[in-house]
Every structure is written in C-alpha cells, then in structure tokens.
C-alpha cells in the first residue's frame, strides 16, 4: 500500500510538470492561439466537468431567475471558456517579459489613485482576470503590495503561482491564516492591500448579507480592514478581451467604511452585483458561493 501511494504521488508530480510545461510553452505563442486553445478547453470542461457545470447553473438560476434556461446554459458555457482562457493566460502573465504584459494589459480609469498618499485597499472581485489585475498593479507602483491568497493543494502549481505573482514590484503574499495584525501594520505604513473578499469561507469567518437578493455568507474584511488600516477603498475591475485585459480602476469610495460592518458588506455586494451585470459570464460562478446557508435553510447544491 505504501509503495502504491508513492507511485501515485510520483505520477501526480510528473503530470503536474507536464501540464505546467505545456501551459508555459503555450504562453510563448501569439495570444489568439492561446485563446483558441482556451475555447476548446472550455467546451471540453463544460461537457466533462458536469458536477462543476451544475454549480455554475445553480448559481445562475439563483442570481438570474428571469433568464431563460437557454440563456443560462449559454452563459455557463461561456464562463467555462473564460475560466479556461484565463488559466492558460497565466503561461504568459507569469512568464512573459514585462513589455509583453504592458502591451496586453490596458489600464483605464482612475489609476492616479495609486499615486495618492495614504493606505489603499484595492477591491478586486473574482472576475477571471484577477491575476492580470494584480500584475497590472505591481507593474505600475513601487509601493509594497500585499495580497491575501488561498494556497493551492498542488505544491508545484502553488510555487509557480507564488513566483509569478511576485515577479514585479514589491509584492508580499499572505494567506488568510496569517492573522490581521501584520496586514493592518502594512497598511498603516502607506501600504497597498489587494483584497478579494467575495468568496464563501464558511460561517466562522462570514456574516449573512444579501447578494442577488439571497442571504449570503460574506467575509466582512473589506469594511474591517479599511477601518482598522484607515485606508481608502478603490475598486479594480478586470475584463478579459481579445487583445488581453482591460483594467478599470474606479473612483475611491467616499462613503466607505461606516460604523456599520453589515451595512458596508451589503453595500459591497450590491456594487459587485452591478459590475457582474456588465459581464456576467466573466464572474467566478464555478465557486459554490451559496454553500453556507443560514440555520434551517435548505442546501442549494
């Protein structure tokens, strides 16, 4: 049995190296080729990954009950394509020279917000271009950028992601288990925090506030970090395009944070809803956003 487990572990490492090697090699090809392979990969995943397809379809039914079944399926297929394209894009995002990224990462909006003094929290929701958004920031500013991420189970992928995310600027990676004090300390030194709080991390870390009219377990970290770190909140939206990504930096929120954490978190979700409406297929619907339910509520998945 021990030998069998060692063989499985060895085969898994070999497979991971092969996959990462292919993604890196693909990243050297013209972008239309990468995106074309992503389309094919997305179609295959849509057919074969039926448990995750069901998650996407449930999410879309809950959030867009007015849509027809045909439209939900069409958006679900497109979200698998965007998921695949953005994953393959990491072959050039995390490997290509800076000049290639500058050609493909188009910055629009209020990027001057990064140059204003004082701590800043960049609220970057889980659209598929989130890693491109983080690199666009680290390429633009000399300020220390801290980002909170979830470590990957595959150690090879995790190491590759860490190297890719840190290769420009002064980037400090933290997990959500590292504690709040160090994050607040970095913010108060005029630091920059890249925050993605729109995920379901269970009832222990969340409060229930509306999201598309559904009581949704939501991490209230944006409000709390903004208050404790005395930081401005600046939203950053990443949109995947045929040419690469459009990075739209919005105006800082003038009315945030307040003294009401639940109200702030509900406001965050409401504004996120309005952005999702502009590119519904590019949101991270493969995540079980409604997995945690209030006591007594039926499960959705």
Image (cartoon, grey):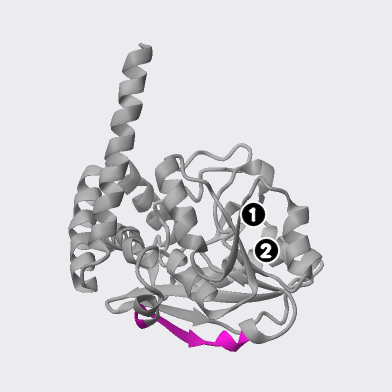
Q: Residues within 10 Å of mark 2 (few under 14, many from 20)?
A: many
Secondary structure under the numbered disc 2 in the rendered image: helix
Q: How many marks?
A: 2
Q: Would residue 50 be found to the left or right of residue 200 on screen?
A: left
Instruction: Look at 40% across and 81% down and name the residue there.
Output: 102
Mark seen at residue 222 = 2
Front one among 58 and 152: 152
Q: Quadrant of the N terminus?
A: top left
Q: Is residue 227 visible?
A: yes
The image quadrant that residue 230 belongs to is: bottom right
Are circles 2 and 1 on residues that touch, CB within 8 Å?
Answer: yes
The stretch in magenta equals 103-113
Q: Which mark is residue 77?
A: none
Residue 109: x and y, percent?
A: 51, 87
Q: Which residue is mark 1?
A: 219
Q: Position of residue 143 (x, y in %)?
A: 64, 75
Which of 281 and 65 lies nearest the eye of the viewer? 281
Residue 83 lies in magenta, yes or no?
no
Horizontal side, residue 122 vs residue 9: left or right: right
C-alpha gap between disc 2 and disc 1? 8 Å
Q: Position of residue 184 (x, y in %)?
A: 76, 61
């Amino acid at each position: 049995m021990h030998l069998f487990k060692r063989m499985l572990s060895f085969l898994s490492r070999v497979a991971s190296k092969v996959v990462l090697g292919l993604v890196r090699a693909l990243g050297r090809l013209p972008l239309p080729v990468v995106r074309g392979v992503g389309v094919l990969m997305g179609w295959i995943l849509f057919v074969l990954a039926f448990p995750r397809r069901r998650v996407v379809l449930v999410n879309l039914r809950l959030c867009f009950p007015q849509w027809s079944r045909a439209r939900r399926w069409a958006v679900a297929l497109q979200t698998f394509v965007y998921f695949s394209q953005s994953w393959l894009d990491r072959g050039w995002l995390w490997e290509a020279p800076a000049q290639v990224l500058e050609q493909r990462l188009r910055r629009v909006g209020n990027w001057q917000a990064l140059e204003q003094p004082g701590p800043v929290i960049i609220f970057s929701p889980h659209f598929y271009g989130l890693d491109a958004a983080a690199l666009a920031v680290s390429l633009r500013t000399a300020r220390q950028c801290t980002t909170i991420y979830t470590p990957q189970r595959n150690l090879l992928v995790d190491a590759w992601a860490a190297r890719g995310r840190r290769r420009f600027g002064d980037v400090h990676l933290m997990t959500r288990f590292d504690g709040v004090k160090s994050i607040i300390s970095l913010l108060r030194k005029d630091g920059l925090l890249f925050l993605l709080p729109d995920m379901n991390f269970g009832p222990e870390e969340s409060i229930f506030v509306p999201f598309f009219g559904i009581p949704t377990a939501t991490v209230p970290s944006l409000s709390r970090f903004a208050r404790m770190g005395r930081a401005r909140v600046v939203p950053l939206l990443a949109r995947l395009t045929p040419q690469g990504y459009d990075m739209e930096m919005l105006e800082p929120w003038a009315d945030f944070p307040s003294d009401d954490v639940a109200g702030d978190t509900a406001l965050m979700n409401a504004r996120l809803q309005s952005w999702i409406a502009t590119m519904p297929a590019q949101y991270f619907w493969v995540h079980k956003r409604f997995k945690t339910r209030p006591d007594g509520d039926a499960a959705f998945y």
